[in-house]
Image (spheres, helix red, strand yellow):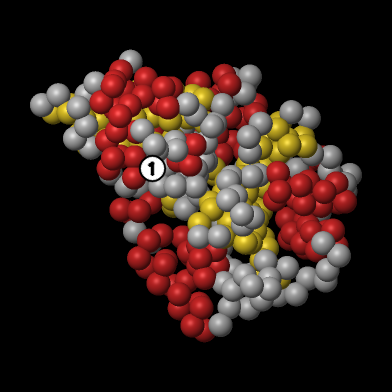
Amino acid sequence: MKYLETYSNDPEYNLAFEEYCFRHLPLENDEYFFLWQNRPAVIIGKNQNAYQEVNDDYVRGHNLKVVRRITGGGAVYHDLGNLNFSFVAKTKENQTIDFKRYYIPIINALEKIGVKAELSGRNDVTIDGQKCIGASQSVWQGRVLSNGCILFDVRLEELSKALNVRKEKLASKGVKSVRARVTNIKPHLKRDISVSDFKAELLKAIFELEGQEPVEYKLSASELEGVKKIYAERFSLKEWNYGASPKAEYSHYERFPIGSIEVFFNVKNAKISDLKIHGDFFGTKDVAEIEKLLEGCEYEKNAVSKKLAGTDLKSYFGAIEKDEFIEMFFR
């Protein structure tokens, strides 16, 4: 395994760097790991509705960037008090979303530093029941990107103000506020260290647990040009980061064990149109395929069921039954 450095705190650039590494770095003989930081920003999941997830007045008033990543999951607040990690590796045969494989090295490394953390729920790491790490993941053409946000010394009050979190999600976690649900790692350490020291110790621990010395892979000039191209064509654009706010006559939100799903659609001449699907779910396929499949479908349960026949919804959303998904259109 090699480690990478982005040499940047720009969230748009860092997410472009991550995507380039995920899609293009050679994986024949190596996997990659990197730790990186963003200046204050809100990072939303691939399938989320930015206009619902972000406190727009607060974000604009504090000049925070809103950036959409290419992995699923929920919105997170970044500042220089947190530390983000990314693993880029080859997938196992027919691999689906699997957080444990990439969380366990982080948990073991934290224990080596002196923090007792544990896996919780579908994609969280907690200390004494409070979330300190959230992760997301993408699987594409035999490659997996597993990334996460480690709350080390984040300004938690800013985090709670920048995000809009549905009451249903908080209730599913048994808490009344975002602030009550999360904790920083720093107060749980027996010694006072900076985030820079924490980064160095975590990197060292990860490689020690692999039985390796950290060796940096430095991107070539042409590879860095590839990063800049992705930055210019995706992450620097409002069209990608915010997308269009769904304008729909009908909508329904549902929270499942695999996360939230919300459908927005119109019915024209008794047929489904303008369907948009948002949520913090994880899948290996693009939900735009489902949106296209159901466009023009007769607005009737049997018709929708026939359209979805042979479609593996688990590839798009995780472990959800077809009847559960169809029912969302008729409530």
Let me know if residue 96 appears in the view: yes
Depth check: 53 or 314 in front?
Answer: 314
Q: Is residue 157 left or right of residue 57?
A: right
Q: Is residue 244 left or right of residue 310?
A: left
At which x and y percent is residue 228? 44, 72
Let me know if residue 86 appears in the view: no
Q: Amino acid at mark 1?
A: Val
Q: Is residue 282 above or below residue 175?
A: below
- Return the residue found at the far left: 269
Residue at the spot 84% in from the left edge and 58% down from the top edge: 209
Check the picture and name the quadrant holding the N terminus.
Answer: bottom right
Q: Is residue 99 above or below residue 275?
A: below
At which x and y percent is residue 206? 79, 59
Check the picture and name the quadrant holding the C terminus.
Answer: top left
Residue at the spot 74% in from the left edge and 28% down from the top edge: 129
At which x and y percent is residue 136? 57, 46
* Dot 1 alpha-carbon crowd within 10 angstroms: few under 14, some 14 to 19, many 20 or more: some
Residue at the spot 51% in from the left edge and 25% down from the top edge: 256
Secondary structure of the residue carrying numbered label 1: loop
Residue 174 lies in quadrant: top right
Q: Is residue 170 above or below residue 98?
A: above
Depth check: 231 or 80 in front?
Answer: 231
Depth check: 252 or 17 in front?
Answer: 252
Residue at which label 1 appears: 287
At which x and y percent is residue 132? 69, 39
Give the number of marks. Answer: 1
Q: Is residue 197 left or right of residue 191?
A: left
Residue at the spot 37% in from the left edge and 20% down from the top edge: 327
